[in-house]
Amino acid sequence: MSSTTEASAGRAQIAARTLRTDRWWLPPLANFVGLALWVVYATVRAFMQDWYFVPQYNYLTPFYSPCVSNGCVEQAAHFGRFLPDVWWLPYASLTLPFLLLFRLTCYYYRKAYYRAFWLSPPACAVAEPHKKYTGETRFPLLGQNLHRYFFYIAAIISLINTYDAIEAFIKEDGSFGLGLGNIILVINVVMLWAYTVSCHSCRSIIGGRLNHFSKHPLRYKLWVQVSRLNGKHMQLAWTTLATLAITDFYIMAVSAGWFADLRIVG
């Protein structure tokens, strides 16, 4: 396919890259800055291998869940320790690659980083600088079609995060406890579930392959609810990046002793 900057028969010959006069470059710039900052923070934290668990309150950051490295403290290894403890292997390397792939292949994130990093295109009615356009028909973008399978894995990981949030209500001595950390963990899990369920693949799985919704009232009701969430998929995508970072930072700060957890019960 020809570039959008090339002349074609029957179309106006416009030398300018765009005739838009608004600040069309602001959204892709904001996406670039936001995504870049988050990737840097998440990468540093994933390889830090420290300040990820608060044993007194059983707080485990989602960046290290499940903690399956031999370097994990025993209390944080809810599902065992079997990966080698080396600096280049994150403690949660069993799940982090799939979470990354789930986000990378997400329909909204594709739009965000295609525009922000590849300028393909940077905005509507703005020509892209690339001479050729092949879409998602070549490697590695051909792998975007695997998104539905990464959705299933992301759902399992969300179950693990839910288990961690519930486990955090039991303190080190076995008694019930409630602190600000518990509230943050629960909010993060709720948002993660909302983002995961609002996925286009989830909507397709629930309502797909049906010719008559009237014959499947339960699936129709579920499809309606998921469709409502799907309309907020972009907002949920960014909200979960924020809740993940906030949850991780709070647990890191408490674990490092920068400040104490605000306790409500116990």
Image (spheres, rainbow, N blue to C red):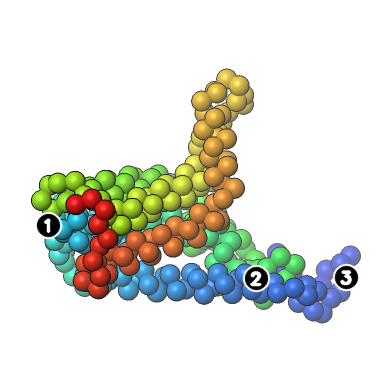
> Which residue is at the front of the view, 9 or 186?
186
- The kind of residue on which mark 2 rests is Pro
**Location of mark 1 (residue):** 74
Mark toward the start of the polypeptide (1 vs 3): 3
Mark toward the start of the polypeptide (2 vs 3): 3
- The kind of residue on which mark 1 rests is Glu
> Which residue is at the front of the view, 28 or 22?
22
Q: Secondary structure at mark 2?
A: loop
**Location of mark 3 (residue):** 12
Q: Is residue 174 left or right of residue 186?
A: left
- The kind of residue on which mark 3 rests is Ala
Residue at position x 19%, y 56% in the image: 57
- Marks 2,1: beta carbons within 8 A: no
* 189 relative to 46, above or below: above
* 213 relative to 145, above or below: above
Q: Position of residue 224 (x, y in %)?
A: 57, 35
* 188 relative to 222, above or below: below
Question: Would you say residue 174 is visible in this rendering?
Answer: yes
The crowding category of the residue bearing disc 3, from other C-alpha atoms within 10 Å (few below 14, some 14 to 19, many at least 20), is few
Residue at position x 69%, y 72% in the image: 24
**Residue 7: quadrant of the picture:** bottom right
Judged by depth in the image, the label closer to the viewer, 1 or 3, is: 1
**Location of mark 2 (residue):** 122
